Image (cartoon, rainbow, N blue to C red):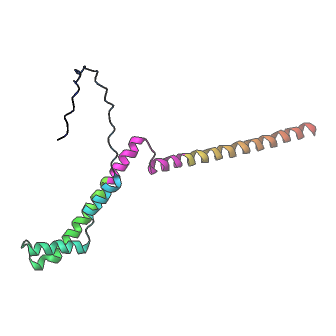
């Protein structure tokens, strides 16, 4: 048995000021993992659907003549889920981009149309000014010729 060491008397605890807690930022979700999990949930291959239907037949929940119909229904449900997940992700991306104030394709197309319209108007007004200067130059040349002649 090891010898017992003497213990040091403990100091009474002194109340201290609580340390301020910095608000912690939420952890950034691992989008790749979340999407992969969603894809596993939504992408059901025909072979997987057939295996599920066969399991239901073995458990007595499905008649053997209903396997093909069940497989088709499972594939269709998988397709609908996949489309729903895709729409959900697209909506969230749009919402997040809107919150950041980034321009959308529609915004850029609208801006491009407006710029094209302004450029056309400037070209037209420049052409009119040039034509007016030519006409003015011809008139002053004609007046000079009349005075000289």
Q: Say left or right for 111 vs 46.
A: right
Task: From the viewer's side, name the closer residue of 131 and 83.
Answer: 83
Q: Position of residue 68 (x, y in %)?
A: 17, 77
Residue depicted at 20% across the width and 36% down the height: 3
Quarter of the picture containing the N terminus is top left
In the rendered image, residue 90 lying in the magenta stretch gets the answer yes
Q: Eyeballing the image, is 132 above or below 7? A: below
Residue depicted at 32% across the width and 56% down the height: 33
Q: Residue 100's image quarter?
A: top left
- Give the extent of the magenta segment: 89-114
Q: Eyeballing the image, is 21 above or below 49? A: above
Q: Position of residue 120 (x, y in %)?
A: 60, 48
Residue most extreme to the right: 149
Q: Residue 49's image quarter?
A: bottom left
Task: From the viewer's side, name the closer residue of 90 and 104.
Answer: 90
Residue depicted at 37% across the width and 50% down the height: 93
Q: Specify the principal SS of the magenta part.
A: helix
Q: Position of residue 106 (x, y in %)?
A: 44, 50
Task: From the viewer's side, name the closer residue of 69 and 134.
Answer: 69
Q: Residue 48's image quarter?
A: bottom left
């Amino acid at each position: 048995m090891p010898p017992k060491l003497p213990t040091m008397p403990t100091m009474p605890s002194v109340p201290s000021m609580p340390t301020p807690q910095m608000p912690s930022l939420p952890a950034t979700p691992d989008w790749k993992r979340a999407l992969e999990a969603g894809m596993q949930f939504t992408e059901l291959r025909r072979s997987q659907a057939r295996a599920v239907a066969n399991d239901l037949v073995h458990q007595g929940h499905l008649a053997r003549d209903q396997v093909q119909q069940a497989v088709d229904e499972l594939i269709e449900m998988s397709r609908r889920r996949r489309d729903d997940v895709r729409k959900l992700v697209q909506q969230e991306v749009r919402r997040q981009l809107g919150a950041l104030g980034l321009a959308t394709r529609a915004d850029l197309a609208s801006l491009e149309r407006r710029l094209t319209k302004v450029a056309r108007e400037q070209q037209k007004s420049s052409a009119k000014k040039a034509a007016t200067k030519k006409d003015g130059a011809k008139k002053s040349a004609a007046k000079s010729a009349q005075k000289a002649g």
